[in-house]
Image (cartoon, rainbow, N blue to C red):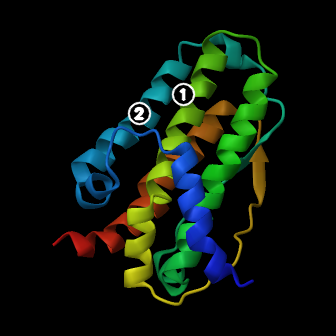
């Protein structure tokens, strides 16, 4: 079965299982202030990290990092659904890897911080896979098929992980949302 046929079903299933955000997908798409508010939650994790002595040791297992760098001309040449798939796969990897690292850590501020990171990534996942977003993506980009993204790096350094996550949100995710924002006007 073609990926383009499975994708809407997969998106609906994931959205129904992980979406626990307090922001509506339409607010996320159409309101830059709401996106900023949700992004601030990720920035707050960085601030909390500075007061946590649990995170002096490397995380185990390592966390796969998204390629958060953007060359705008190259990025725009990639099909929208491939760009969306790259961001979603980065979020899925982050959730999966952080969950595994958290299980190997004692309870405390480090575990709490990783739980916050996992929750934040799940919120983004839930919003991006919500059926209303999937419908909008299909309306604006009909018939595009997706190819799986390549994840190249991993890290056990929580500062580097948070920096990559923050850059993903401020960069690639924000560019995707700006492109979908046209439906709001």
Instruction: Determine whether the residue tagged by mark 2 lies in a helix, strand or loop.
Output: helix
Q: Earlier in the sequence, mark 1 or mark 2?
A: 2
Judging by the rendered image, the residue that carries numbered circle 1 is 116
Q: Could you tell me which secondary element the residue under label 1 belongs to?
A: helix
Q: Horizontal and vertical percent for residue 33?
A: 23, 47
Tell me, for residue 85, which label it has, or none. none
Closest to the observer: 168 or 82? 82
Q: Does residue 48 appear in this view?
A: yes
Residue contact at pointers 1 and 2, CB within 8 angstroms: yes
Q: Residues within 10 Å of mark 2 (few under 14, many from 20)?
A: some
| Closest to the observer, 17 or 162 | 17
Quadrant containing the C terminus in the rendered view:
bottom left
Q: Position of residue 11 (x, y in %)?
A: 56, 63
Q: Residue at x 49, y 28 (%)?
A: 45
Across and down, in percent, residue 96 comes to: 72, 42
In the image, 183 versus 135, the foreground residue is 135
Residue 153: x and y in percent read: 76, 54
Is residue 57 toward the left or the right of residue 172 in the image? Answer: right
Quadrant containing the N terminus is: bottom right
Callout 1: 10 Å neighbours few (<14), some, many (20+)? some
User: Residue 41 shows which numbered tag?
Assistant: 2
Hey, which quadrant is residue 157 in on the image?
top right
Relative to 140, is 95 above or below? above
Instruction: Tell me which residue sits at (48%, 63%) in the image.
Output: 172
Q: Quick check: 149 left or right of 12?
A: right
Q: Residue at coordinates 84% horizontally, 35% vertically from top-left?
A: 61
Q: From mark 1 to mark 2, how far is it between C-alphas?
A: 9 Å
């Amino acid at each position: 079965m073609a990926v383009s046929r499975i994708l809407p079903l997969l998106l609906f299933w994931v959205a129904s299982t992980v979406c626990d955000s307090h922001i509506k997908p339409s607010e996320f798409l159409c309101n830059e202030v709401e996106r900023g508010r949700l992004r601030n939650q990720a920035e707050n994790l960085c601030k909390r990290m500075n007061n946590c002595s649990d995170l002096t040791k490397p995380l185990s297992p390592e966390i796969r990092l998204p390629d958060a760098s953007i060359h705008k001309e190259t990025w725009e040449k990639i099909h929208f659904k491939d760009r969306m798939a790259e961001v979603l796969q980065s979020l899925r990897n982050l959730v999966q890897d952080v969950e595994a690292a958290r299980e190997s850590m004692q309870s405390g501020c480090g575990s709490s911080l990783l739980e916050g990171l996992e929750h934040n990534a799940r919120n983004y996942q839930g919003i991006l896979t919500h059926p209303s977003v999937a419908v909008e993506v299909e309306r604006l980009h009909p018939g595009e098929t997706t190819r799986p993204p390549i994840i190249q790096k991993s890290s056990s350094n929580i500062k580097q992980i948070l920096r990559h996550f923050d850059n993903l949100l401020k960069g690639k995710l924000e560019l995707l949302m700006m492109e979908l924002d046209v439906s709001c006007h």
